[in-house]
Image (cartoon, grey):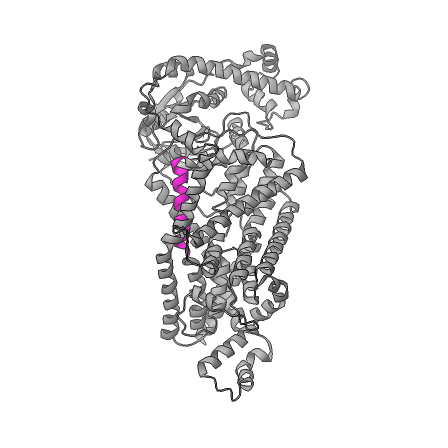
Amino acid sequence: MINQNINIALIGNPNTGKTSVFNQLTGLNQQVGNYPGITVEKKIGFCKLPNNVKGNILDLPGTYSLNASSIDENVVIELLLNKNDKLYPDVAIVVTEVENLKRNLLLFTQIKDLEIPTILVINMADRMEYKGITLDIPYLEEHLKTKIALISSRKGYGIEELKNLIVSYKSIPTEACLNASSIAPEYFNSLRKAFPNQLLYKLWLVITQDVNFLNLERKEIQGTFTKSHSDLKRLQQKETIKRYQFINDVLKEGLQVDASIAKDFRSKLDRALTHKVWGYVIFFAILFLIFQSIFEWSKIPMDFIDSTFASLSALTNSELPAGVLTNLISQGIIPGIGGILIFIPQIAFLFLFISILEESGYMSRVVFLMDKIMRNFGLSGKSVVPLISGTACAIPAIMATRNIENWKERLITILVTPFTTCSARLPVYAIIISLVIPDTYVLGILNLQGLTLMLLYLLGFGMAIFSAYILNIILKIKSKTFFVVEMPNYKLPLFKNVALNVVEKTKAFVFGAGKIILAISIVLWFMASYGPGKKFKNAEAIQLSKIENAGISQDELDNKVAAYKLENSYIGIMGKTIEPAISPLGYDWKIGIAIISSFAAREVFVGTLATIYSVGSTGNDDTIKNKMAAEVNPVTGKKIFNFASGISLLLFYAFALQCASTIAITKKETNSWKWPLGQLIFMSTFAYIVALVTYQILK
Amino acid sequence: MLQEIVAFAALGVAVVFLIKKFFFKKKKKDKSCGGDDCGCH
């Protein structure tokens, strides 16, 4: 029986293991990242505590201080200032990391000033011995006026002690641990007198931040207490210095580091991985290995899935009673779904590598490396996180731009992020590369197909930063964002976290896109199997009259009738209408239909072609890849997927926006149709021109 | 006949699903991309 419900706010700097603590307390499997910006909005979980107490655990976005400057940081302040909020915490848990205690404690001292019972969690305590760190817990508790839980969220110890501390939160002192108002005594005294019923530090936050709370509106304080922007900044700086002086004094006694017993391998490794030359060499070598592996290791499972679906299609056709439904299943649904499922091995491998890089701590070194490059293009390192996370999907990547305080810089990052190669592009790239790039080795070790895939990823990233450079000139950004990236410790990736991430991302890929692909396959099959007018109805008679006395076999006749019907079906008529616009790029009307349908989701491209090529091919158990490889242009007699049209198509997909959801999220984040429409027009036009020029040169 | 009824019913469901998905998007309560689909499909 539950006796009591309490709200618990989980607060901390990015990368202190806050989300891991959340998972340990709630048992939830939230994604845990090892680079900043994972939690951009608050998340709630529930925890059963001792004495039949139920805890509502609120995981707030990581923030370095209460001097908020970005949207996600404001989420923290707005909650902590509003006692009427139903989620207002009864107790706050500030999560810190033992190796970065000094910096982490700044936020702790600010939370203490809000007079909320606050527990200090010192995470990653398992590394103390390794780093030669000893803590005087009673001394720290006394001077920080709190209770401390020493935990390791990775190893799961200290969590029970933390739960006991949470339950006894009423015994935790609520008084501030230092008097920050001493930075300007007269000013704060008059403020206290004017609003005797309000908490002084809350008043200070209302003055300095863009937030309101309770019935106190900013305008009430304006006039008498509002200072100039520069005066406020100066006072904030004094406040920060005052807090750090206090923290230094406390840690001088409470924390000892004996470097002689530390076994620090990290600094040496950091020097190599972030080296101005070797850092990039290592990064590109890792990228190269990833893309080689994606192609090499996926071959066998992909071929297996492809041939299984082809056999299933043939089996369905032969075993089920003849009719419309049987044709829909064997020629529409099975090829359409098969067209997406064959990419599961490649998607799984991609996310396996990304998860290992994130979990190990290497991704933060990549962010640091990229920061140096980004500065040359007018962006700060804060833009790197969205660009790198865009390799999974542009939607969360665009949401992650909320970390960027400078509006114009955020806008540029939103606009260029869709150039980063997302996982939805991978199926398109993989199938076209396997059709037009030979499966050979350069210099005996470099697989040409893997190399092409890697170049496409680099091209997307290169185009993103080049576009940022152009936009930076056009939009004339003057102010710069300062970027602080924390270098987390290297960790052996936890199998559970990596496996969960791979399974979740692959599931999202299959079930998210799968439903759309299933629906589109059904619609496409009907549109390809029915048509208006006499040409479609009398296809067989027309073909028979054309080939009278030509002496062709029944199979050849069936193929000609099927092809003629397809051209005169609803989808054939639509495709033929748009064909003049895409034929200069080397595409036929079937590719045109696939491009249009893939606007719903890029991976629909392969499913669409699989469905179109299957219509009319009764009993054919050929794989999708073989069907695409066999497609011939009836006019020129050349293969549809040749080197020129293939490269043109790859470049089209590298640059085109082709994602309805990205347009929707850009509209939401910029609060205007102007930017997403501009983005769509620019990217589509650019993709078209590049594809056109490429085909005309290579053909 | 039965095959036609089922096939056309599937077509109806598919069309309604696509219209709802792209023209009447429901608002998500939790916009996090944590362990769920990010809604990009």
Q: Is residue B13 visible?
A: no
- Give me the residue at 61% from left, 66% from top: A579
What is the x, y in percent for residue A223?
69, 20
- Give me the residue at 51% from left, 13% from top: A179
* Residue furthest front as drawn: A443
Q: Can you say which quadrant of the picture contains the C terminus of chain A?
A: bottom right
Q: Nearer the viewer, residue A308 or A513?
A: A308
- Give me the residue at 49% from left, 29% from top: A63
The quarter of the picture where residue A693 lies is bottom right
Q: What is the chief secondary structure element of the magenta stretch?
A: helix
Picture mark count = 0
Question: Which segment is the magenta one?
Answer: A343-361
Examine the rendered structure and indicate whether residue A461 appears above or below residue A340.
Answer: above
What is the x, y in percent for residue A127?
33, 26
Q: Can you say which quadrant of the picture contains the N terminus of chain A?
A: top left
Q: Is residue A105 visible?
A: yes
Q: Nearer the viewer, residue A269 or A58?
A: A269
Q: Is residue A357 magenta?
A: yes
Q: Is residue B30 magenta?
A: no
What is the x, y in percent for residue A243?
50, 16
Q: Nearer the viewer, residue A191 or A382?
A: A382
Examine the rendered structure and indicate whether residue A586 appears above or below residue A685.
Answer: below
The quarter of the picture where residue A320 lies is bottom left
- In the picture provided, is B26 more to the left or to the right than A288? right
Examine the rendered structure and indicate whether residue A442 appears above or below residue A261.
Answer: below
